[in-house]
Image (cartoon, rainbow, N blue to C red):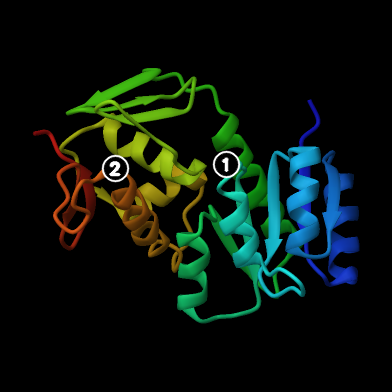
Amino acid sequence: MTKTIMIVDDEERLVSLLEAYFSQEGFRVVKAANGRQALTLARQEKPDLIVLDIMMPEMDGYEFMAAHRKEQGTPIIMLTAKVDNDDKVIGLELGADDYVTKPFRPRELLARVRALLRRVGANEPTAKVLRCLDVTLDRQSHLVSVGEREVDLTPSEFDLLAALMSTPGRAFSRLELLDRIQGMAYEGYERTIDVHIKNLRAKIEAEPREPRYIETVYGVGYRFSRD
């Protein structure tokens, strides 16, 4: 089945380039010039993945993500011309799954898109339901619950939790976790795991600053508690 990519950017030249590139690779492409248009288009088209610029008129990428994440869990790759880590962190905290810094090669973005789609749509050969302590993760229904409470996670948060819950007590490095959730690990990107962990703790932990489930292993990375 043909996957639909929504490109949200006000740079017409870049959008035309990406549209031609993704179409050539077999994707269906829909376009929006700002976040406000993108919200309407996302409701109509229900894209499989969104490539989202941050700096746009009317409604920027941050505002779009804040609104869109209340409605849908579509995988999002944000495009940013900013090199400040704080800007990337804000995007990840709002629910972006990955980011690419401008200028970039279309081939790199395509690799990220394919890896994220592959990860989201993969048929896992492992256990369909994971249970650790009072956390339950169902891969087929993409549902997570803590006790009786259901928790809404982004695709990256879901896959990160699944990786940690697959082997309770095992310490995963940031690069290992990045490879698990993206299908590829780029040096310099591993700190994005810290942001996803922060978001995940905020959603599943009663006291995020004193986590019961996701433990920090200093000098290594993270692990899911055995008890």
Name the quadrant of the C terminus: top left
Q: In this view, does 67 lie above or below 49?
A: below
**Image side of residue 55 versus residue 84, left or right:** right
211 or 226: nearer the viewer: 211
- Which residue is at 55% across, 36% downward? 119
Read off the residue under disc 1. Answer: 73
Point out residue 144 in the picture as x, y percentages from the top left corner. Answer: 38, 30
Point out residue 17 in the picture as x, y percentages from the top left corner. Answer: 88, 62
Q: Is residue 127 above or below residue 61?
A: above
- Which residue is at 75% across, 41% downward? 43
Sequence-first disc among 2 and 1: 1
- Tell me the quarter of the picture where residue 174 sits: bottom left
Read off the residue under disc 2. Answer: 204
62 or 77: nearer the viewer: 62
Q: Is mark 1 on a helix, strand or loop?
A: loop
- Which residue is at 38% across, 43% downward? 160
Q: In this view, does 211 lie above or below 81?
A: above
Is disc 2 surrounded by few (<14), some (14 to 19) or many (20+) residues within 10 Å? Answer: many
